[in-house]
Image (cartoon, rainbow, N blue to C red):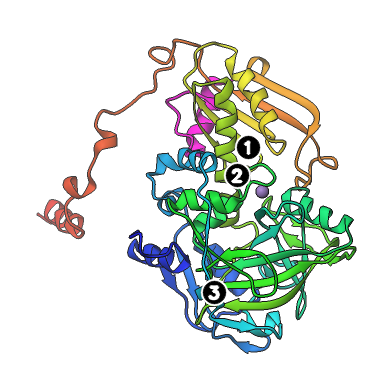
Amino acid sequence: MPQSMPADLRAWLHALEAEGHLAVAKAGASLRHEIAAISKHLEREKALLFPAPRGERGAYDIPVVTNLLIDRSSVAAALGVPDHGVLTKFLSAAQKPIAPVEVDRAPVQEVVHKDVDLEGLLPIPTHNELDSGAYITAAVLIARSPETGVQNMSIHRCQISGPDRIGVLLLPRHTHAYYRQAEKQGVHLEIALVIGVHPAYLLASQAIAALDEDEMGIAGALLGRPTEVVKCLTNNVRVPAHAEIVLEGRLLPGVREPEGPFGEFPQYYGPRANREVIAIDAITHRRQPIFHTIVGGGYEHLILGGVPREATLLQHLRRSFPNVLDVRLTRGGTCRYHLVVKIDKLNDGEPKNIMMGAFAGHYDVKQVIVVDRDVDIDSAVDIEWAVATRFQADRDLLVVSGAQGSRLDPSADEGMSAKMGLDATAPIGTLGDTYRRIRVPGEAEVDRAAVLQAPGGAKDYLRALLDG
Ligand code: MN
């Protein structure tokens, strides 16, 4: 991307289009389930723009966009690295953040609405069958610490509870910590919800950083230059100047209202409960803005959380085990619960130490499979093959009972969970003989265009051969 072009949603849509990864739906798709249905159907193939989306109040001028990340290659492209460089890039960005620069005038403030009517103005979809209603799902929530003024970026599910009211789920992380500080003093917490940004911001918001470490700096490092931010009009929060839409608001002290159910990443509904509430004071946006939504539990949701967690787990494991080559949180494991660790094994027994290290690395990790360097950890088939042929349950299985796990895993007991480790590595020194994989020389290098006749060739050849 040329340095003169801002790294915003529009630049990313141009990049997707140039690669043939962007499709435009027919105008007038329904906000209620239809946009989600089409998006999920194509979630591994295309980013989608939905012109003139239709809601109960009619059609909107503002298009909806979905599926900004369709595979690991699109994550790599968003970060400007080859596929194998994603985790390293993420780690180096987290270690060397680039602070944002503040500007006075910003595209995201071209249009200002002080009379707030969320669903009157914005095309906000309803995704899963039992969701309580319309949700803003792709907004980066930016909060300012009331004590230090340092900002935090995170993503939360935001239920539309009224024209200017949002019910929000705050897990016990940084935004929640800032909110508790404010609530203790009996004051609101200033926030902004930022919709429609380059995927680097979304990925940065998921970094497992320290409290009071601004993820905006990680976004800058992912993009290789400082991000431009502008002060909100009704509060002190700084938001990306080239975002599409910003909702300026406050997390209210002492207020809890019903929120949920909502379809979540484990492919189940998060339940309805009394949760925190945001009041929106102003909406600003670019001229002709684009509204980004993420389908709850869809691939984009999974991969956005998965990649930053993988980077953190890789770093954590390499401190003790420098021979860890790569890690994956598998899609079937909801990109959270099941980890595969690829190693260049130096000692028998080491896989079990690595399993214990991984369980300690993040409480969500429930299953660890350790494999050798000859296994493709992007392939569920290859991983199962390693278990099928290198694992013996009475010897290679580790089970830990009663540990902390994910509260969103319905099989866990209030978050109490068992852990399972599978050592699917071959005994040391055997990959060259007993455990040598069969291989057809040249298979990996086959160039279809060079070796196959043109389409239609089969018909012609068959006719000549059989009717000859
Ligand atoms: Mn944080």
Query: Which secondary structure lies at badge 3?
Result: helix
Image-based side of 441 in relation to 33, left or right = left
Confirm if mark 3 falls within 8 A of ligand 1. Answer: no
Image-based side of 455 in relation to 355, left or right = left
Query: Which secondary structure lies at badge 1?
Result: strand
Q: Mark 3 points at which residue?
A: 108
Instruction: Look at the image and tell me in which quarter the N terminus lies.
Output: bottom left
Of the numbered discs in the image, which one, if any, rests on residue 338?
A: 1
Of the numbered discs in the image, which one, if any, rests on residue 332?
A: 2
Distance Cα–Cα, label 3 vs label 2: 38 Å
User: Which is nearer the eye, 291 or 24?
Assistant: 291
Work out whether mark 3 precedes mark 2 in sequence or the reverse, and give the earlier one.
3
Magenta residue check for 380: yes
Q: Where does the magenta region start and end?
A: 370-391
Image location (x, y in percent) of residue 361: 66, 31
Q: What residue type is labelled 1?
A: His
**Pointer 2 with pointer 1, Cβ within 8 A:** yes
User: Which is nearer the eye, 407 or 81?
Assistant: 81
- Determine whether 391 is above or below 140 in the image: above
Image-based side of 224 in relation to 290, left or right = left
